[in-house]
Amino acid sequence: MGSAFDQDSAMSGEYPGQPGGCSKQQNANIGMLRRRFLETYGEGPGEIHVFFAPGRVNLIGEHIDYNGGYVLPVALSIGIYAAVRYSEPPGRGSSTVSLDEQERTVHLASVNEPGRASVDLSESILYEPSRGWANYPLGIIQQLQHGWANQGRLGWPCRHGRHALGDRCSGIAKSHALGNPGQSHAAGYNLRGCQVLYWGNLPVGAGLSSSAAIEVLTAYFMLYPALKDNLQSTGRIWLAQLCQRAENDFVKVQCGIMDQFAVAMGKRNHAILLDCASLDYRYIPVLLGDYSVVIMNTGKRRGLGESKYNRRRAECEGALSAIRSHSWCTHVENLAQATIKQVEYAFGLKRKDVLAKPRTCAMPSGAEQFAGPGNTTISDQVLRNTTPSGSPALAQSVLGRRARHVVTENLRTLEAQELLLKGDVTGFGCLMTESHMSLRDDYEVTGFELDAIVDAALSSDCCAGARMTGAGFGGCAIALVKSDCFEEFRIRVGKQYSEKTGLKAEFYACAIEDGVRRLE
């Protein structure tokens, strides 16, 4: 896979997001959260801090992060807030007071979700299904406990090369701290007990990364007493990796790095072109002129652990193994690195037009739209027996289509960043539509609701392109819509979608914002 970071200016410098002024709406949200915090926990010693982590939407490059390719996410102006009051240890002002000398309990509550959780920082934290939403922040605290106890297991992010799908890099520099080279990250920092109240205006289960937002948010405020606002670029990448590990190992969802990276590293009015294999990245200005990115929530909630997300990861691993079994493909380290010719040869697929021009932005309508292959699945036994020479025809066909989506989507993402840099909004919109068709036909992660809302969006003259975003199987789609047509678009698309599905869609015209930060 060629590099998209050949220019001297490609790599970002220090992370640009720093505490600054809040919008009028954010100030209202902060005031409400402070009042609810006092209702929940009452008055007490210590200042109440407020933190914010954005949701994210991926403009293009879907199901690519765990396949080692390029993605193009943005951080949103909607997300999750946390009001936090830290316990005051003896010897206030020292960051090296030991845990047994200070209050060690973390209390978690949410305005949006029922139930509370409390944990002692001196004790091991285990996953408990009955805790529901609280397992996401508790997984972060558990990883921070583990990282502090095992210096070097979590540390400086890998920058030295790409790795096969599913591999974890062991080449972590142990001598680097959270953005402070040369200092042990196990030395001098103790987690503080605290009272926490979460509130979000991010729809849960809609594919806007509410799980990544609460993870990165929790990691940030748990580290804040020691690090304040000093988490710069390298420390934020470390933060994203820690949060991904927590979701993989604690919650048992095998997500890639994109969601946590976007929440930690987002930049106002920019997308992040991220190479998920090396974590090289660059910021791409998102200047859409007369258009806005509109998020369309289908109203069908989905959870990664309940969906076929892990199945698609297993299928991609099978496809990679099949490609690498050929002697001339052993150098392919991840699925996104393969070429379309290698995929066609390995699986005997007929060539489809890849990034063909001129483009059409419209998808087939009516019955033809839903006449794709369907939600084909493969049993565990078939996956285990997948080999290029003797796998069942169904398995070969399915694995081939999964691989074809990954390779073509990776190419679309690289072309998308070029079109954005040129200000070609129409061309970018067409790429979005092509992406949805590939996710529908080759990757099979859209479903009736997502297809219906994208079809309705594309029927509007105000729309330049639309696609599902997130893991799929429900959740959200995005559309490029003329800004002065938003109300007309919302009413028309909402009506068509409701008539077809019986569900009520929600529409958000969101701004592109900075990553996780302290508000006050």
Image (tube, rainbow, N blue to C red):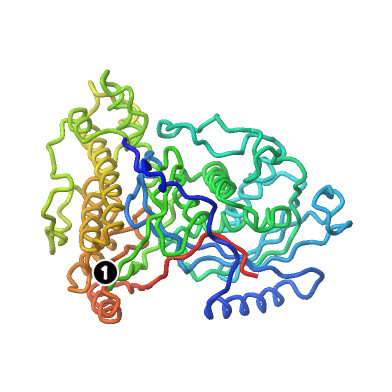
Indicate left or right for 81 with 487 as reference.
right
Q: Estimate how packed mark 1 is, as few (under 14), some (14 to 19) or many (20 or more) residues with alpha carbons within 10 Å.
A: some
The percent position of residue 219, horizontal first and vertical second, equals 62, 53
| Residue drawn at 42 percent across, 42 percent down | 276
Quadrant of the rendered structure where residue 84 is? bottom right
Looking at the rendered structure, the number of numbered marks drawn on it comes to 1
Instruction: State whether residue 136 is above or below residue 188.
Output: below
The percent position of residue 112, horizontal first and vertical second, equals 55, 70
> From this viewpoint, which residue is outermost toward the front?
8
Quadrant of the rendered structure where residue 463 is? bottom left
Instruction: State whether residue 338 is above or below residue 515.
Output: above
The percent position of residue 268, horizontal first and vertical second, equals 46, 64
Indicate left or right for 18 with 287 as reference.
right
| Residue drawn at 53 percent across, 58 percent down | 16
Which is nearer the eye, 371 or 219?
219
Q: Say which element carries label 1.
A: helix
Q: Is residue 251 visible?
A: no
Which is nearer the eye, 35 or 342?
342
Pick the quarter of the image with the C terminus.
bottom right
The percent position of residue 103, horizontal first and vertical second, equals 82, 56
| Residue drawn at 28 percent across, 66 percent down | 479
Q: Is residue 3 visible?
A: yes
Quadrant of the rendered structure where residue 290 is? bottom left
Which is nearer the eye, 520 or 460?
520
Pick the quarter of the image with the N terminus.
top left
Q: Which residue is mark 1?
A: 501
Instruction: State whether residue 56 is above or below residue 342.
Output: below
Indicate left or right for 310 with 290 as reference.
right
Which is nearer the eye, 308 or 437?
437
* Amino acid type indicated by mark 1: Thr
